[in-house]
Amino acid sequence: MPASAGTTTVDPSHNQSAPANTHPSARPDGEVLRAHAEHAFADELAALAAQDDRPRPARWKLSPWAVATYLLGGTLPDGTVVTPKYVGPRRIVEVAVTTLATDRALLLLGVPGTAKTWVSEHLAAAVSGDSTLLVQGTAGTPEEAIRYGWNYARLLAHGPSRDALVPSPVMRAMAEGMTARVEELTRIPADVQDTLITILSEKTLPIPELGQEVQAVRGFNLIATANDRDRGVNDLSSALRRRFNTVVLPLPESADAEVDIVSRRVDQIGRSLDLPAVPDGVDEIRRVVTVFRELRDGVTTDGRTKLKSPSGTLSTAEAISVVTNGLALAAHFGDGVLRPCDVAAGILGAVVRDPAADRVIWQEYLEAVVRERDGWTDFYRACREASA
């Protein structure tokens, strides 16, 4: 029966209905397609922890300085090279990390493809050593995904009890002093979003069915992501927005920075799929990035020709997808070298989202810009063939 004599605390980590451990180390080598950040970069995190002599907030695995170094990359005193996970302004990362060291939650905002989820995962991995306390926001996300649910077999058999309670990732993070993540916050219905208000302001999650509550312990915080294109879908209430410190992740400032990002991510993905090495396709990566940036910005790189922008976002993430797919084509149906014919169809699919308007914009770009560009003849022909 539920408790009734005052409010007590409950430890959801003792719940018998918690999911089974799916740690990659419990599986055969090579079986996991994409390891969580804390496992994929375990050596770097361990090296940072071993040499990190700076103050750490309660229950943090690393100091704020080491967390920022993990994301931005660097060379440690013992010569260990930490690869950059995010290529962008250092101050953005420093503000994000500092926010997590306070009692305010962090909202990563930006257009699609600006690495919000990627940064969120790596922040959680570096701070808490666990990036899996995740709520995926959709139009159908229920309140239970943020608060808690019930094992209905036990609920019907024995009534409300601790054993029947199924903690959400947020509840577990509160009880264990860890970092929870909420992806695509603005896609969640407004009434479900607002269940976060008490959690973020009072640091408490009431369980009225048991007359109990979960109080957040030191180390708890929450990272949410949202994209600019979702404005008007389920806008955050002013009360909820005040509980967040918002950090806007911009698009890469330069073509070189974007080429570097695409090359690094494609190389990481390619190794897990046994695809050809990225250096063999750097020229095509730069070409894909150039096309995306020019159409996205509405002007050619030299600033001489104004362009119409298609309806798609043409984000860095989409460029990574186009190049990865091109590498797969080159590996399985070509000679292993990335060529224009391998990326042309992917670019067409990314650019032409609206079959009527976007196709006209793409054809105009091909004829007015690509056709006249030195060294792009093969690319022009491949794109014309893909568009036929």
Image (cartoon, rainbow, N blue to C red):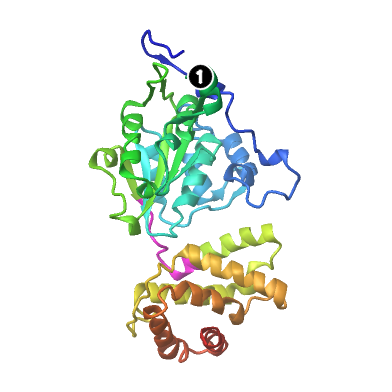
Name the residue: 55% across, 70% down: 322
Name the residue: 52% across, 87% down: 388
Q: Is residue 181 among what the camera can see?
A: yes
- Residue that sits furthest to the left in the current view: 238
Name the residue: 59% across, 24% down: 16
The percent coordinates of residue 344 (x first, y second) are: 55, 79
* Residue 337 sits inside the magenta stretch: no
The percent coordinates of residue 72 (x first, y second) are: 49, 51
| Amino acid type at image mark 1 | Arg
Name the residue: 31% across, 53% down: 233
- Relative height, residue 7 to residue 94 (above, below): above
The percent coordinates of residue 343 (x first, y second) are: 57, 76
Give, as a single range, the part of the protein colored magenta.
248-259
**Total numbered labels:** 1
- Relative height, residue 284 to residue 62 (above, below): below
**Viewer-side residue, 60 vs 80:** 60
The percent coordinates of residue 160 (x first, y second) are: 47, 19
- Relative height, residue 249 to residue 145 (above, below): below
